[in-house]
Amino acid sequence: MAALPSEFDALLATRREGHGMPRAFYQTEALFEQELSRIWHGGWLFAGFAFEIAKPGDYLTFSVGGTSVLVMRDDGNAVRAFHNVCRHRGTLLCRADAGHVRAIVCPYHSWTYSRQGELVNCHGMQEGLDKSKLGLKPLAVEVVSGLIYVSLAASPPDFAPLREEFEPAARPQGFDRAKIARMIEYDVEANWKLVWENNRECFHCPSCHPQYIKANFDIYEEEYASPAIRAQMAAAVARTHDKWASEGLAITHAEGGLARFPDPDLDLWYAADRTVMVDGFETESMDGKRVAPLMGDYQDCDVGVLRMRSMVNFWVHGSCDHAVAARLSPAGPRKTNVRGYWLVDQFAQEGADYDLEKLLPFWHLTNQQDWDISKWQQKGVDSIGYEPGPLSSQKEYNVDAFIRWYLKQMRAGGASGGKAVPLTRVA
Amino acid sequence: MAALPSEFDALLATRREGHGMPRAFYQTEALFEQELSRIWHGGWLFAGFAFEIAKPGDYLTFSVGGTSVLVMRDDGNAVRAFHNVCRHRGTLLCRADAGHVRAIVCPYHSWTYSRQGELVNCHGMQEGLDKSKLGLKPLAVEVVSGLIYVSLAASPPDFAPLREEFEPAARPQGFDRAKIARMIEYDVEANWKLVWENNRECFHCPSCHPQYIKANFDIYEEEYASPAIRAQMAAAVARTHDKWASEGLAITHAEGGLARFPDPDLDLWYAADRTVMVDGFETESMDGKRVAPLMGDYQDCDVGVLRMRSMVNFWVHGSCDHAVAARLSPAGPRKTNVRGYWLVDQFAQEGADYDLEKLLPFWHLTNQQDWDISKWQQKGVDSIGYEPGPLSSQKEYNVDAFIRWYLKQMRAGGASGGKAVPLTRVA
Amino acid sequence: MAALPSEFDALLATRREGHGMPRAFYQTEALFEQELSRIWHGGWLFAGFAFEIAKPGDYLTFSVGGTSVLVMRDDGNAVRAFHNVCRHRGTLLCRADAGHVRAIVCPYHSWTYSRQGELVNCHGMQEGLDKSKLGLKPLAVEVVSGLIYVSLAASPPDFAPLREEFEPAARPQGFDRAKIARMIEYDVEANWKLVWENNRECFHCPSCHPQYIKANFDIYEEEYASPAIRAQMAAAVARTHDKWASEGLAITHAEGGLARFPDPDLDLWYAADRTVMVDGFETESMDGKRVAPLMGDYQDCDVGVLRMRSMVNFWVHGSCDHAVAARLSPAGPRKTNVRGYWLVDQFAQEGADYDLEKLLPFWHLTNQQDWDISKWQQKGVDSIGYEPGPLSSQKEYNVDAFIRWYLKQMRAGGASGGKAVPLTRVA
């Protein structure tokens, strides 16, 4: 990757330690383009779930800025990813969000590719054209416990460490035995970094998420946990430990507050942990009551919440009965598209086993609250009066970590590192 | 303020004396940014009326480009202005156009500011944070006869000359004893300079404003006033002079045509004068009949029209019974937001004392006619065929003055001068 | 014309011979501006039909980027073209797509121009203003067989060669004795060059235009024509030759496939030819049956299809009974406006002689299919995964020719050449 142009180097240097980032980080078109090429096109991106493309010929598409990725189940049942553009004149090949094809036929001149991406027909072209050099451009793709990751990079970072971390953590949730109960596309009027900064702290939860904070201990960092709260957490940890330790379901994030992520010092761009829920909450629903059949390997509701996330576009919360994921896509300096997924067990039937009116609100509200406040933050940082303020060392350690991770990626030029160091914070 | 980049210096030099400005002045994003910082962020801006924020905790907001200003009545009943962004992460604080608060609480992390702008609570932040350094960023604010002015400049121009000019002129109108009967927000599809150039001449009035020209003598510059017109003006001047001289209501602009404003040579960026109306017109209404109770100190309708304006975002016309003001806000090279205000006496009751259907049309039509023609002018100056033409020395002297004022501000770098020289043109 | 800035020279050099153009050609704002000034403002543009402005004072307007052109029938019945902006302050003069005026009166300050473009009244301006220097800026205009062409260039390319080519070809169609049955404005979400690349090949016809290919031999290039097809073409050619040779209606493009156009080597930016239709097709309608009375000099339906086109904004297909034309206007790197015209004989009456439901579909569908695929191509070339592919030497020779023509214009700096070399490909 080419060196970062010097004007951006100078901009990156304007960030004051322990503070947010200056205004230009959130509104400059040219910086946004650099971020696409150095971060979004460099690391691993969550693209969707393997069950979405269950059969050969099933596909899904995913956009990163102006670039469309095609993820397809091939004839050998393997998951492949390609640039979703014809090698002839560049037309977008698969134009739906998802679908099924026997072969990939360009709608323009009918150049036809197999599900393995080989160019198999380009009738009308001259003799002697070397079809073997005109297959779809393959992209790196990995599947871990039902999650599909792709990378636009020529030499993507090592995926093994994420796999090592996610596989045992994700297996019990059964992402590979799930289905999508609902997807919602959100257009967030904020820079993608504001969306992440919002996601990386629960300092805002008391003011923005009245229902979310009833379910979990996110706002109870060490300094803020009363003896009663501590006792409640400890009891939940002990109870689940006794029950689940042997099955990989033990609580790994046993304290209040958010687990530390990302870690720019250890180059950790992925993390998974399991947290306890507040007494009375079986799942992340409005009243805490179960809203769908148990998922995956779960035997009862007392499994806390599985949380996983990876830089730069994915997070998921898995309860005993459903999971809610988010896939980010940057659409401009002031615009981010987020797809929200609500997953339930593959055999659950709407109406009989679950009801969208009970399944959706907890996270749909939380999402809307987050996108709304991010929009107002964007409007504020656009002001000449905005000056980055101090971050709370107790509550915004992850915002600081995110900013440092971001700056490191921008300076290093791209790939997310992916150093295979285990997460030191895991209990 | 930094020196103007040389490419803009070169652009400014392309204006030919006595002519309009070339195309690039009205469509270039980079020039627009320079205008924001050198003119809009440098001078005094009309923000609203003091009666809009009558009680402690009342506030109004006002946007200049991407920058939001918060104007608030503090606990001591004083008017204050701040940058409307949180000192923590930059979120917009007061998100409505106007409202009332006990304290200014950031919607994101509940940082709380007093009505004086002091940071009084930031629970969750580390010990030792110096709250006194994290109060809202204050902005210069002045109130004159009920008009609120703010400046985004660190060292705003001297406000005293405007005060000296406006206070006696505005007092009889009773802007401090008024209320808003109606506000209309206009999105004008034209550069803000075109809006001003339109405002600064009545050469266009015969073709664009059939109803406006019935009420006043704006189109009768020296060369265009017939003996009958001159006699009518002289009679009105004499009559009001006899009646009102001792009460500061005398006609100060006794001839036809527009008073000269702005004056780049004398650095005059504000002006106030009183003009006569055409016989049969008691007020600026469609039929000339009074449409609301008398305002302020007025004892009868024969008070002509009080006109005040200040660079770069305000003008007002005050009749005996109502006043109509405009507040400009630049929103892009080809877009200007204008708020129109219709004021009446504070005790006037809609339905009983005034009727919007009679109050609004005269100026709402005039406004719409102006924004419409400005839009068509913008479309024309966007053409490569546009070449600035000659300005009428009889009728467009103020357009020329505006352009010269603009060029002087851009070259000087900002502040509006504000030299305390009395208006030489006042009769 | 100024030399092309070096960064564009470098960009132009990135095109690989025999392949499409790289991504930056289709999305860069700065390149688009260069294209406007070097190509669109340099050559001849089709503006409309002479019958649209039949009487003195009739006018039509046409936009190229931000520049509006006014085409007017003057008092002497001649067609004139002007920049459609006032010489005073630049306001757009004629604001409708078409209309009729006694004189051209600026809506702003009533500067008034004769239909010859002379400034005849500017009441309110100072004495001594030289009106003769303030007439509307004239543009080069030419009318050939009822087609109006204008040029924004100070020294337009020689028009004579186009006239020589078009006049005999167009005369029998009777564009000067026609009327518009319908116009449709299309907003195409694609770069104007993609619209042309689409137009210049019928490789895409089998997949995109199921109805179009029933009517003509466009997809039967030498290599793809079966003996039966060849025999059918030969018979049609012979038949019409016998019948029409003396009347200028002979088939000039006697083979299958598209006639070669443009020709960057011979600097040919215009072309006209006549092609045969498939047996059973009297006209370009859905079922091949005639949909309107015969046009022009035609005596029966067996006249094939007259096809004319000129760089950079016009093409037309003329059947025996109607003609369908397209006028392009670039509106941004990713947006092109196209006006579609359906012409019939001037005396044809809707309802009695023709029915829009039968007249429109053939080309309205074809147009929509083309704009749709161009949009998907634009989305694909916006991807970082797009790499220009090889062009078919059998089927995309004209795409290659268009690209080479484009590169030559950009390098040469503007004018379309217009070298008076007869079209060598004419049979």
Image (spheres, coloured by chain):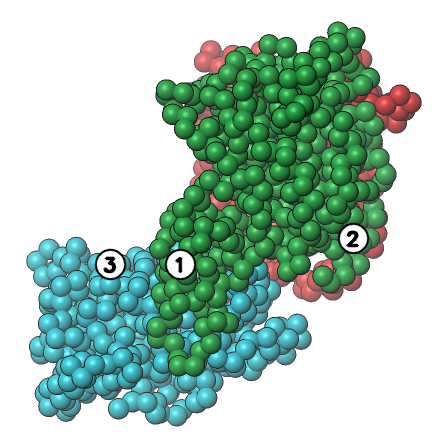
Chain colours: A green, B red, C cyan
Instruction: Pick whichever, A3 or A300, lies toward us.
Output: A300
Instruction: Decide if residue A37 is on the left or right side of residue C149.
Output: right
Secondary-structure class at tag 2: helix
Q: What's the mark number on residue A104?
A: 1
Q: Residue at x 42, y 73 (%)?
A: C312
Q: Residues within 10 Å of mark 3 (few under 14, many from 20)?
A: some
Examine the rendered structure and indicate whether residue C322 appears above or below residue A229: below
Q: Residue at x 68, y 62 (%)?
A: B15
User: Quarter-wise, where is residue B304 in the image?
Assistant: top right
Examine the rendered structure and indicate whether residue B55 appears above or below residue B217: above
Q: Residues within 10 Å of mark 2 (few under 14, many from 20)?
A: some
C-alpha distance separating marks 1 and 3:
38 Å
Q: Residue at x 55, y 65 (%)?
A: C23
Examine the rendered structure and indicate whether residue C204 appears above or below residue B67: below
Q: Which one is in front in this view, the residue at disc 3 or the one at disc 2? A: 2
User: Quarter-wise, where is residue A173 in the image?
Assistant: top right
Discs 1 and 3 carry the same chain letter: no
> Three-letter amino acid code at disc 2?
Arg
> Three-letter amino acid code at disc 3?
Arg
Discs 2 and 1 carry the same chain letter: yes
> Three-letter amino acid code at disc 1?
Ile
Residue linked to disc 2: A411
C-alpha distance separating marks 2 and 1:
39 Å
Residue linked to disc 3: C182
Instruction: Decide if residue C145 is on the left or right side of residue B19.
Output: left
